[in-house]
Amino acid sequence: MKQSARVTLLKALQLAVSVGVIALFWLIYPETLFLFARAFGLCYVAASILALRDKRIGIWLAFGFTLLAFAFSTWGVYRYFDNGFEFLSGNFPGRAGLHWPAYLFVLVALGSLAVILLHLMSRDWMLRGKADRRRPAAG
């Protein structure tokens, strides 16, 4: 069956966000903590791959991981703002160079928000596990 463009975009964006979460964890956590964070990230990628294959458990797990990723990345962006980070200049006041991990938090937060909105708009896919599963009218 042919999928809607919305669900196809949702699947691709969800996989990209899950990989972005692994990159974000790699940047912000030291070695020991990174092992636990990487386990979370790899579970998110696995759930995203299951969602790509239209498995209902993968769809719901990926949605849950996306909610967590959105909450924590939004909290990270808030902490950067709270600590005086200037997103227009790319660094904290009085420092030179570009501190780009802050922008990765923003990308993960925006990507997660887009995935959440697409999930809500594609609730048939979330509930049934297949996109556009409607049967043609008899007649």
Image (cartoon, rainbow, N blue to C red):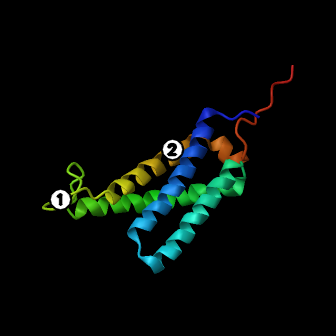
Which structural element holds mark 2?
A: helix
Front-most of residues 74 and 20: 20
Which three-letter amino acid code belongs to the residue tagged 2? Leu
Question: Farthest residue toward the top?
Answer: 139
Q: How many marks?
A: 2
Where is the C terminus found, in terms of image quarters?
A: top right
Q: Which residue is mark 2?
A: 117
Q: Residue at x 22, y 48 (%)?
A: 88
Q: Which residue is mark 1?
A: 96
Residue 57 percent coordinates (x, y): 70, 57
For marks 2 and 1, give the one nearer the viewer.
1
Which structural element holds mark 1?
A: loop
Front-most of residues 86 and 94: 94
Task: Tell me if label 2 and label 1 are in contact, CB under 8 Å.
Answer: no
Whether residue 73 is visible, yes or no, is: yes
Which three-letter amino acid code belongs to the residue tagged 1? Ala
Question: Is residue 25 left or right of 134 when viewed as pictured?
Answer: left
Whether residue 61 is visible, yes or no, is: no
Residue 10 percent coordinates (x, y): 57, 43
Question: Is residue 95 left or right of 55 when viewed as pictured?
Answer: left
The CA span between labels 2 and 1 is 37 Å
Where is the N terminus found, in terms of image quarters?
A: top right
Rendered position, 122 above or below 105: above
